[in-house]
């Protein structure tokens, strides 16, 4: 290591100079008014960034963040952020090549539930905690995508029901902490989901109450009355950090940050103003508070998130490695816009203050950002948790209204091929990251003898296999792809 390299931590902050903005506020007296579960790249580019701006401009000392990890997989980020005193570098990459790095200081500390569950429960139960926020991924909400009901068969949920003082899941922790607050006659904290789920606050509420009613019915009554679950819409494209990002900081700024975050310049957060115990004045730094976030959520999920999956699954089979590479291919651009115009837009509600054509134009520009290079494998990861909410829901609504379903159906057929063959059209292996990877592969592998085998997975597709119009169209499309995996040819045929 170069002797001039500065290891990022609180003690070395004053040494950082030269073209990088650093923390301009005193972090010593900031209280952790927010406990955040699931400290990944997105949280650090989004909520933690907004919180940092609030500290920087308005000295909001009661609204620092205590990060929490509940899984063994959170140990690495815990260890890095602990070593760096919660500090990290946010690297904003503009389409024109401009790069803006800044040091973010809003995360005060990080605790790991797998090491000490009671420490996490006590932190949430502390009077200083006003909000518990979540980025636990779509799969973390533990519901059946086809029915929307809580999955009590999950072994970790069964453990938590029997062992309330040593939980493993987010529901076990939240219930234990809220019980301590109730017993101490403290106001309830708000639970704020920041995940890409339609009506995310409503879903968090329904799932937590399902769990709590089974574990402690009296407590569930108190939660139902006292805890607020604001819905929110979150947006900022945040790719996985690469070694080149780490090297860039060290080479150009002399900073050794073991886990920086990269993101696009665009950022948006729309939140319902519905909190149990106060909230930060995020509106001062650009957050939009509204009475009803649902139209904004639906717009973003059905256009941006579904659009990402359209590009990701079709791009994976074609052999494109990044989303911006897909957007350099006219067929993919035209197909994406056709999906957005003909299938996603017709099912949207009125979104006040938003011109949908301009919004779709902006999505195309964001996806095409050549400096983000968001990997197709990241976008395709956990498709079993994403597609029922982003894409299949759109398909179902269009089926019910007799509208176009062709563009979404080809993506579902591509998902089957992707899950089965696990190589692109050139025979190169594709990286499959999905909690249901085995089940998806097993079902898809039966396509040769039963063209509908993949869509007969009712936990994902409900009764769609029984819908004659969809099943007939899907059968034709999946057989086309299996006979000729040149996905671009099939896309062109539809344009």
Image: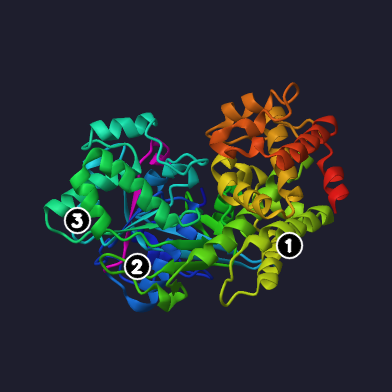
- From the viewer's side, name the closer residue of 327 and 242: 327
Tag nearer the camera, 3 or 2: 2
**Residue located beneath label 1 in the image:** 341
Spatial CA span between label 2 and label 1: 33 Å
- Residue drawn at the location 33% of the way across and 44% of the way down: 210
Asked if the residue at tag 3 contacts the one at tag 1, i.e. Cβ–Cβ closer than 8 Å, the answer is no
| Residue at far top of view | 449
Left or right: residue 411 compared with residue 378: right
Q: Nearer the N terminus, badge 1 or badge 3?
A: 3
In terms of secondary structure, where does tag 2 sit?
loop
In terms of secondary structure, where does tag 3 sit?
loop
Q: Nearer the N terminus, badge 3 or badge 2?
A: 3
- Residue drawn at the location 56% of the way across and 57% of the way down: 262
Q: Nearer the N terminus, badge 2 or badge 1?
A: 2
**Magenta extent:** 62-76
Q: Residue 87: say if magenta.
A: no
**Residue located beneath label 3 in the image:** 126
Spatial CA span between label 3 and label 2: 21 Å
| Coordinates of residue 6 in the picture (x, y in percent) | 45, 57
- Residue drawn at the location 38% of the way across and 36% of the way down: 72
**Residue located beneath label 2 in the image:** 274
């Amino acid at each position: 290591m170069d002797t001039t390299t500065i290891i990022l931590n609180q003690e070395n902050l004053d040494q950082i100079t030269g073209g990088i903005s650093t923390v301009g506020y005193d972090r010593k007296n900031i209280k952790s008014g927010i406990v955040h579960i699931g400290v990944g790249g997105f949280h650090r580019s989004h909520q933690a960034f907004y919180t940092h701006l609030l500290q920087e401009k308005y000295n909001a000392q009661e609204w620092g963040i205590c990060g929490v990890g509940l899984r063994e997989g959170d140990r690495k980020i815990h260890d890095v952020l602990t070593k760096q005193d919660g500090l990290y570098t946010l690297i904003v990459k503009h389409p024109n090549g401009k790069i803006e790095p800044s040091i973010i200081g809003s995360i005060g500390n990080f605790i790991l539930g797998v090491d000490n569950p009671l420490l996490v429960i006590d932190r949430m139960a502390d009077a200083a905690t006003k909000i518990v926020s979540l980025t636990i991924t779509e799969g973390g909400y533990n519901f059946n995508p086809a029915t929307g009901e809580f999955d009590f068969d999950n072994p970790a949920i069964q453990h938590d029901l029997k062992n309330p003082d040593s939980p493993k899941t987010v529901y076990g922790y939240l219930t234990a902490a809220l019980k301590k607050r109730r017993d101490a006659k403290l106001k309830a904290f708000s639970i704020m989901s920041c995940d890409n789920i339609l009506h995310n606050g409503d879903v968090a509420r329904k799932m937590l109450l399902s769990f709590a009613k089974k574990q402690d019915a009296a407590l569930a009554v108190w939660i139902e009355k006292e805890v607020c679950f604001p819905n929110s819409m979150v947006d900022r494209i945040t790719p996985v950090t690469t070694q080149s990002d780490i090297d860039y900081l060290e080479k150009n700024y002399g900073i050794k940050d073991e886990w920086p975050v990269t993101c696009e310049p665009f950022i948006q957060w729309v939140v319902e103003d519905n909190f149990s115990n106060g909230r930060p004045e995020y509106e001062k730094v650009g957050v939009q508070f509204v009475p009803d976030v649902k139209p904004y959520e639906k717009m973003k999920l059905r256009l941006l998130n579904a659009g990402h999956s359209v590009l990701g699954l079709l791009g994976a089979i074609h052999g494109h490695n990044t989303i911006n590479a897909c957007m350099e291919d006219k067929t993919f651009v035209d197909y994406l816009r056709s999906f957005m115009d003909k299938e996603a837009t017709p099912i949207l509600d009125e979104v006040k203050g938003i011109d949908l054509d301009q919004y779709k134009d902006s999505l195309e520009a964001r996806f095409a950002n050549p400096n983000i290079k968001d990997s197709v494998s990241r976008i395709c990861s956990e498709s079993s948790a994403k597609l029922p909410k982003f894409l299949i829901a759109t398909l179902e609504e269009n089926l019910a209204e007799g509208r176009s379903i062709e563009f979404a159906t080809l993506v579902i057929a591509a998902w089957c091929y992707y899950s089965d063959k696990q190589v692109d059209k050139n025979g190169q292996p594709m990286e499959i990251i999905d909690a249901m990877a085995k089940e998806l592969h097993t079902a898809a592998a039966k396509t040769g003898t039963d063209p509908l085998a993949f869509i007969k997975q009712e936990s994902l597709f409900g009764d769609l296999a029984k819908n004659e119009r969809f099943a007939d169209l899907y059968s034709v499309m999946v057989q086309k792809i299996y006979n000729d995996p040149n996905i671009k040819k099939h896309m062109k045929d539809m344009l």
